[in-house]
Amino acid sequence: MPDMPRLAAGNWKMHGLAADLAEARELAATPPPQGVEVLICPPATLIARMAGALAGSGLRVGGQDCHAAAKGAHTGDISAAMLSDAGATHVILGHSERRADHGESSAEVVAKARAAWAAGLVAIVCIGETEAERAAGATLEVVAAQLEHSLPRGATAANAVVAYEPVWAIGSGRTPGAREIAQVHAFLRGQLPDRGIRLLYGGSVKPDNADTIFAIPEVDGALVGGASLKAADFGAIIAALGRN
């Protein structure tokens, strides 16, 4: 949208050791195009070190999840305040892998988003349909319900981003057609409480399809998985975002 930079967000998922910080440093060596914001969300073990490695570059660092509570007896969990303290500015919430692997509900995503805001983080809220839901013609119904129940009241362009990721496309190498992506993004734009909230597309975004995806109306960037692990690939996607 005109008032916000487009966003290329990399989700490293459960990948990355100290040696892989070299990829982030290589990426940071080339400033992003004007009007493009770049975010890398590494595993929690690398957040502080990545924030240090990227200091002064303008690239941002985010977390991949947070607990809804500010602190407490929650072994193995990380609070939003801890992410912020480590140098994060954003946090991914409600990713389909969290919803599937951990049974995470939209109500939990809302609570986590509120916690993120309280800690000064931007919440990247993920929504998307399964292959069965798409085959049943329920895509718009599913994403509308997820958006309504996952995004707290008070969401604005300053504190929230929405990422549409068809579950069946994540890591599969398959993507919906441009017309299908355009239909969902146009629909979601009309459902947003603040039309300036950025809408990212995710699901097998790669250098060879990035130009096509970023030329689609209402696509304000991408949530990139595997292709964000290598500076060359993620850099090519960032460049494509700057061209479109």
Image (cartoon, rainbow, N blue to C red):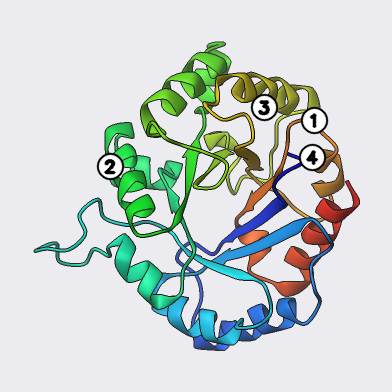
Quarter holding residue 186: top right
Residue type at numbered disc 2? Ala
Answer whether residue 30 is visible to the viewer in this image: yes
Element marked by disc 3: helix
Residue behind mark 1: 217
Residue that label 3 marks: 185
Label 1's element? loop
Q: Please indicate whether residue 89 sits to the left or right of residue 3 in the image.
A: left
User: Which numbered disc, 4 or 2, marks the residue that appears first in the sequence?
Assistant: 2
Q: Which residue is mark 4?
A: 213
Query: What residue does disc 2 label?
Result: 111
Local packing at callout 2 (Cα closer than 10 Å; few below 14, some 14-19, many 20+) is some
**Viewer-closest of 64 and 218:** 218
In terms of secondary structure, where does tag 4 sit? helix
Of the residues under marks 3 and 2, which one precedes in the sequence? 2
Eye-nearest disc, 3 or 2: 2
Say whether disc 1 or disc 2 marks the residue closer to the N-terminus.
2
